[in-house]
């Protein structure tokens, strides 16, 4: 299915809203996906190009062209039980996952609907890695159209002046979010997607 046809399928989903709750849900979804990406990385040993694609998933200029990114997303979607091994959306599991991420009925319904539309739009693709890549692109497009894109900054190992390391940047972010005395402790994970 062509890109234009995919966009036409998504047109009924377009809502001009940028409510904080929807963005917070998408931030939680992205963080959870990021944790599973780390699991898939241990199994698949993919390269930095894929990591770059996934860390920058919500950067509009990131075109997601690497086929290996699709293989990683397939790993993630199957591990999270959002799709089965044949690429069919697991509606009940997807809904439960979204609710666990803080989605209410309206948000969960809209996201599951988008996920199913993207599955239908990409269902003719036989290569499962390409299917997952195109499904990810479709879902991402829908999130951009809904204006639910989580905005975040991905810290580098050092800032442009080379003075701060990653942990210092995370700590500063946590202080901004939770106040100096209410910082959350970061887990010892390789990266975060938010």
Image (cartoon, grey):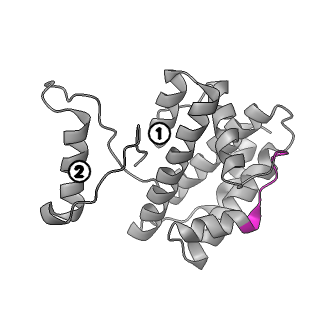
Magenta-drawn stretch, dominant element (helix, strand or loop): loop
Please say whether residue 56 is visible from this viewpoint.
no
Residue 156 percent across, percent down from the top left: 29, 31
Q: CA distance from mark 1 to mark 2?
A: 23 Å
Helix, strand or loop at label 2? It is: helix
Reading the image, the residue beneath label 1 is 60
Residue 144 percent across, percent down from the top left: 52, 51
Residue 60 percent across, percent down from the top left: 47, 39
Name the residue at 61% across, 70% down: 108
| Other-residue count near label 1 (Cα within 10 Å), few / some / many at <14 / 14–19 / ≥20 | few
Q: Is residue 89 magenta?
A: yes
Q: Is residue 113 above or below residue 76?
A: below
Name the residue at 68% across, 48% down: 79
Q: Is residue 8 magenta?
A: no
Magenta stretch bounds: 85-92
Q: Quadrant of residue 109?
A: bottom right
Give the mark toward the camera: 1 or 2: 2
Q: Is residue 177 left or right of residue 1?
A: left
Q: Is residue 77 left or right of residue 150?
A: right
Reading the image, the residue beneath label 2 is 173
Residue 184's disc is none
Q: Earlier in the sequence, mark 1 or mark 2?
A: 1
Q: Is residue 93 above or below residue 150?
A: below
Please say whether residue 194 is visible from this viewpoint.
yes
């Amino acid at each position: 299915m062509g890109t234009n046809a995919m966009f036409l399928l998504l047109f009924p989903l377009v809502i001009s809203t940028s409510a904080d709750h929807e963005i917070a849900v998408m931030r939680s979804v992205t963080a959870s996906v990021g944790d599973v990406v780390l699991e898939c990385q241990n199994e698949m040993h993919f390269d930095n190009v894929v990591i770059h694609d996934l860390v920058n998933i919500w950067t509009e200029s990131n075109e997601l062209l690497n086929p290996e990114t699709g293989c990683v997303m397939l790993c993630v979607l199957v591990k999270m039980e959002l799709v089965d091994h044949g690429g069919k959306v697991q509606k009940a599991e997807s809904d439960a996952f979204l609710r666990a991420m803080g989605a209410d009925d309206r948000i969960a319904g809209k996201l599951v609907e988008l996920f199913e539309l993207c599955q239908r739009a990409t269902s003719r693709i036989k290569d499962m890695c390409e299917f997952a890549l195109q499904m990810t692109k479709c879902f991402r497009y829908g999130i951009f159209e809904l204006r639910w894109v989580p905005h975040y900054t991905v810290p580098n190992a050092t800032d442009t002046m080379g003075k701060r390391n990653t942990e210092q940047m995370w700590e500063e972010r946590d202080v901004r979010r939770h106040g100096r005395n209410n910082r959350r402790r970061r887990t010892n994970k390789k990266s975060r997607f938010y």
